[in-house]
């Protein structure tokens, strides 16, 4: 199958010979010499551009003189071929359509070449190089797209489709964030070790699933079993919680019946990042794209930045690449991404919390839409939660006090109903009898 269109190539060149100003249409579409398949067309277009850049006339006579000066007239088929080009153009005003055809074939030729090389080497390629290949392939298509594919007409954007976002379940905080963490945003949650970041996020995941939003958790620190243990304890209703007392104090365990119900409830709704997979930026991005498009996942929690294995030359460059990629994915798929990043050591001495206390590259808070901070320096068992940046509503310097209930593994507020909350994992006939 021929991956070119001779008529379209000739019509572009013929149209320019008739109306030289049309070179600008080629430039508008990023038409390059190599988009032409036939070598003589490449040469002709190259010299047309040179004449255009020098503000000189373009017609069969000036062009043949330019080609003669460069000893290339014979290579293109002489004056006769140049003159014939003028006669083959069906309509000069259709030049943009001819350009689209030529660029489309050019992109397909590049794609064909990339696929041919890859298929030759595929046996020795690992998963990472295949992912890199697929990304290069996609960039090649995007680079060859028409300029108009790079922009969107604002009137086509509907804001009524997906207003608001994922509710955290803490009413005051949700109102301040603007109906929860808005879709299409990146949140950075910072705080010192043990402040309760993972616990808080665990509760947000439970709330999201309860509200019908599938969720994903990458935990660089907890095993699958620990994640499930925390999660089931957080969502379990009182009749499924068995209380024990040991010399370590009181603790609770979810009954087998409770575990079974919760496990069924999260089927195809809650996903963990595979412990087998390398947690690098390419793999994580790939997992996010897969879950956003195939499993309708809306909330992605990445705990935490320091355990991600990112590409790049130095530590900060790696982090910026990863965070930029997360930001792009959040916007592209209108999902909510929450990234945990530790506080730097200096901030722990500093009384006033601020966005630049995030450990790592200073660009991270600039990229984030929300910056939250958890702190446990006050009275036990309280965790203070601060909003340090809020691109959506602008309200910051907000602080809410969350009290931790060890048995339920839940945070609650003074005025909220969080400890009584039923996340809704029990089949409805059972819920009716639940107090
Ligand atoms: N306010 C609190 N009072 C008492 N215990 C808490 C409180 N917050 C969290 N915990 C408990 O402390 C432990 C550590 O909390 P968690 O892992 O959520 O903190 P973290 O901020 O994510 O820490 P790291 O940064 O080290 O991962 C957990 O077992 C959690 O249940």
Image (cartoon, rainbow, N blue to C red):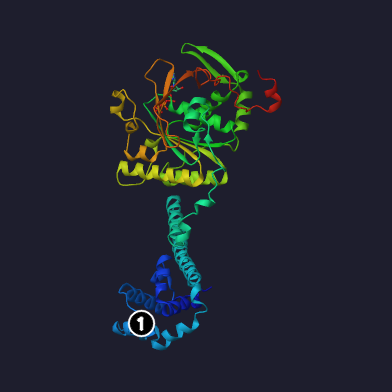
Residue named by callout 1: 63
- In this rendered view, identify the residue nearer to me: 255 or 178: 178
The residue at label 1 has a CB less than 8 Å from ligand 1:
no
List x then y, in percent, for residue 50: 32, 74
The quadrant in which residue 266 appears is top right
The quadrant in which residue 394 appears is top left
Q: Is residue 270 above or below residue 57?
A: above
Task: Please identify the quadrant where the C terminus is shown.
Answer: top right
Q: Could you tell me how many numbered marks the image carries? A: 1
- In this rendered view, identify the residue nearer to me: 330 or 229: 330
Q: Residue at x 48, y 84 (%)?
A: 87
List x then y, in percent, for residue 355: 35, 32
Q: Is residue 347 visible?
A: yes
Q: Residue at x 32, y 72 (%)?
A: 53
Q: Residue at x 43, y 27 (%)?
A: 197
List x then y, in percent, for residue 273: 49, 38
Q: Is residue 274 visible?
A: no
Locate ligand 1 by image quadrant.
top left
Callout 1 secondary element: helix
Q: Residue furthest bottom?
A: 80
Q: Is residue 410 above or below residue 4?
A: above
List x then y, in percent, for residue 358: 34, 33
Q: Residues within 10 Å of mark 1 (few under 14, many from 20)?
A: many
């Amino acid at each position: 199958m021929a991956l070119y269109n001779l008529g379209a190539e000739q019509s572009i060149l013929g149209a320019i010979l008739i109306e030289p100003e049309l070179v600008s249409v080629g430039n508008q579409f990023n038409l390059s010499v190599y988009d032409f398949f036939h070598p003589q067309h490449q040469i002709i277009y190259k010299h047309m551009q040179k004449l255009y850049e020098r503000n000189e006339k373009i017609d069969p006579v000036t062009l043949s003189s330019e080609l003669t000066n460069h000893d290339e007239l014979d290579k293109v088929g002489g004056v006769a071929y140049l003159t014939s080009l003028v006669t083959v153009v069906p309509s000069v005003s259709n030049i943009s359509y001819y350009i689209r055809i030529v660029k489309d074939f050019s992109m397909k030729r590049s794609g064909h070449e990339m696929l041919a090389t890859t298929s030759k080497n595929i046996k020795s390629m690992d998963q990472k190089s295949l992912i890199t290949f697929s990304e290069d392939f996609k960039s090649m298509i995007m680079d060859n797209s028409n300029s108009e594919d790079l922009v969107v007409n604002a009137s086509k954007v509907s804001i009524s489709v997906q207003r608001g976002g994922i509710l955290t379940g803490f009413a005051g905080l949700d109102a301040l964030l603007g109906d929860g963490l808005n879709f299409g945003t990146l949140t950075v949650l910072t705080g010192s070790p043990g402040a309760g970041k993972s616990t808080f996020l665990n509760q947000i995941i439970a709330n999201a699933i309860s509200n019908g939003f599938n969720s994903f958790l990458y935990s660089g620190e907890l095993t699958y079993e620990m994640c499930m243990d925390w999660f089931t304890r957080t969502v379990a209703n009182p009749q499924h919680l068995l209380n024990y007392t040991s010399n370590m104090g009181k603790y609770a365990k979810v009954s087998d019946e409770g575990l079974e119900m919760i496990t069924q409830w999260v089927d195809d709704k809650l996903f963990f990042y595979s412990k087998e997979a390398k947690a690098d930026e390419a793999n994580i991005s790939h997992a996010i794209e897969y879950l956003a498009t195939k499993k309708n996942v809306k909330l992605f929690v990445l705990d935490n930045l320091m355990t991600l294995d990112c590409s790049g030359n130095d530590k900060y460059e790696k982090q910026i690449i990863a965070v930029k990629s997360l930001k792009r994915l959040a916007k592209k798929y209108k999902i909510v991404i929450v990234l945990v990043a530790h506080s730097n050591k200096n901030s722990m001495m500093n009384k006033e919390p601020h966005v630049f206390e995030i450990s790592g590259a200073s660009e991270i808070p600039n990229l984030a839409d929300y910056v939250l901070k958890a702190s446990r320096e006050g009275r036990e068992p309280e965790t203070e939660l601060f909003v340090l940046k809020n691109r959506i509503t602008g309200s910051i310097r907000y602080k809410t006090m969350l009290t931790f209930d060890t048995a339920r593994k839940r945070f609650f507020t003074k005025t909220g109903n969080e400890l009584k909350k039923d996340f809704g994992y029990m089949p409805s006939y059972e819920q009716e009898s639940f107090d």
